[in-house]
Structures are given as structure tokens and as C-alpha cells.
Image (spheres, helix red, strand yellow):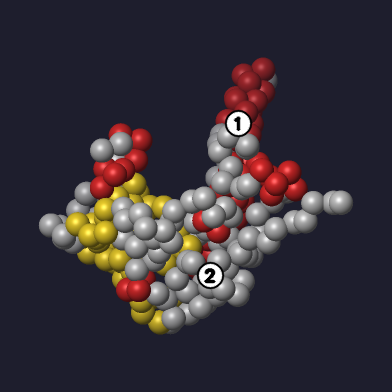
Amino acid sequence: MKKIFFVLAVVFLFFNCSPKKVSYEDEIKLFQYKLNTEFADAEKSPLTAGDLKTFKTLDFFEIDKNFKVEAEFELTPNTPVFEMQTNTDRLPLYRKYGIARFTLNGEKFELNIYQSLDLMSNPEFEDYLFLPFNDTTNGKSSYGGGRYLDLEFPPKESKTIVIDFNKAYNPYCAYNTKYSCPIPPSENNLPIDIPVGVKAYKKIKSPV
């Protein structure tokens, strides 16, 4: 009897102590929490000193898993280095790393994915890929200068790459004019709404 009780106890502990699978919504909420934590930290935040005093949270669209897509991925080796336009006279160097083709709401689209030459030599960001884009929410419910997505190198020989627009965020210059931010190239203009990710920033007036 004691042996049976012991076995049942072990089984109970195994199932209750096993790691629980994180839901997709929790994954995105964790992403949002990390962004808010960064923005609330005076040493990391892009906010002005005045805006930081009243900061509580960024505004986010509703989470929608339909805007997480598995795109066909085409690697574009030996593409020329080019200067990406910014909101200032700074011209950072990038190369087109690949092309992502995907279907969203029954329509087919493609976006270019870029690699920063400056970050290639930084071990912390050597696997970092950059996907800036515009969509038809720009200047309305989202920032007028477009939004960004951070991606990592797909596995070697992979023919697909995951793009999750729920993780789209604003350039730092959406919050503070002291920053210089890349402007999404025209080939990355999406002629549809992407109503997920971070919304346009609305300043909160300090109480008088």
C-alpha cells in the first residue's frame, strides 16, 4: 500500500512540477512587459526626462495571432551594401539579407529583410536581422514613420522565417527627437492595415 501511495505521489509531483506551456497571448504580453520595463528605466528609456515622469505604459493594439505568419524565405547573398535613409543626415550601412513572402488575410505580400553592417561585428547582435515596414495605419493609429521588427537568422538551409507583427515596435525617434532612425524603404510599404503591435505614442501632460 505504501509503495502504491509513493508511486501516485511521484506521478502527482511530476505532472504538477513539469513546465507549463506558455500560451501565445502570454508570450506577447511578456514582450509588452519587457518593452514597458525598458521604457520605465531612466538609464535605458528613449523618453525625455519630462515624459518619463508621467510614463505608465505604452499603448498596444489587441493581440491577434492571425498576424503571426510563417513566410517563405529567399536568401539574397552578395547583395550590395547601401545607405539607408534616416530622419537625419546619418546614413547607416545595410545589405538586403533576404526576402520574405507571405499571405495575410488572403493577400500575398513580400518584405525585404536587412542586415546592419555595424551590428555584424558585434557578437551580441551578430544574428540580428532588421525588418522595417510601413502600413496603412501609419499616421493614424500607429507612428507615422513606420515600425520595426527584430528577427534572428533562420536555421541554415531554412526555406521559411516567422514574422510576428504583434511584436512590431516604434523607432526611438517616435518618442524623442534626439534620435536618428532608419526610414523603412519604399519596397517595404504594405498597402494594408497591420493593427497589432505598438500604437502611436501619446504624451501624458504633467499635472500642473
Which residue corresponds to mark 1?
Answer: 17
Tag shown at residue 152: none
Q: Is residue 154 left or right of residue 149?
A: left
Q: Secondary structure at mark 2?
A: loop
2 and 1 marks in contact (CB < 8 Å): no
**Residue located 60% across and 25% down the image:** 10
Give neighbour class at mark 1: few <14, some 14-19, many 20+ (Cα, 10 Å).
Answer: few
Q: Position of residue 131 (x, y in %)?
A: 38, 60
Determine if residue 114 is in view: no
**Residue located 31% across and 53% down the image:** 92
For marks 2 and 1, the one nearer the N-term is 1
Q: Nearer the viewer, residue 6 or 1?
A: 6
Q: Is residue 96 left or right of residue 139?
A: left
Q: Is residue 190 above or below residue 98?
A: below
Q: Residue furthest right?
A: 208
**Residue located 31% across and 60% down the image:** 84
Q: Nearer the viewer, residue 163 or 143?
A: 143
For residue 191, what is the image quadrant? bottom left
Q: Position of residue 105 (x, y in %)?
A: 47, 79
Tag shown at residue 144: 2
Rounded to the nearest angstrom, the CA distance separating label 2 from label 1 is 47 Å
Q: Position of residue 58 (x, y in %)?
A: 65, 54
Give amino acid for label 1: Cys
Q: Nearer the viewer, residue 114 or 177?
A: 177
Q: Secondary structure at mark 1?
A: helix
The nearer-to-camera label among 2 and 1 is 2
Give amino acid for label 2: Gly
Q: Residue furthest top?
A: 2
**Residue located 61% across and 71% down the image:** 141
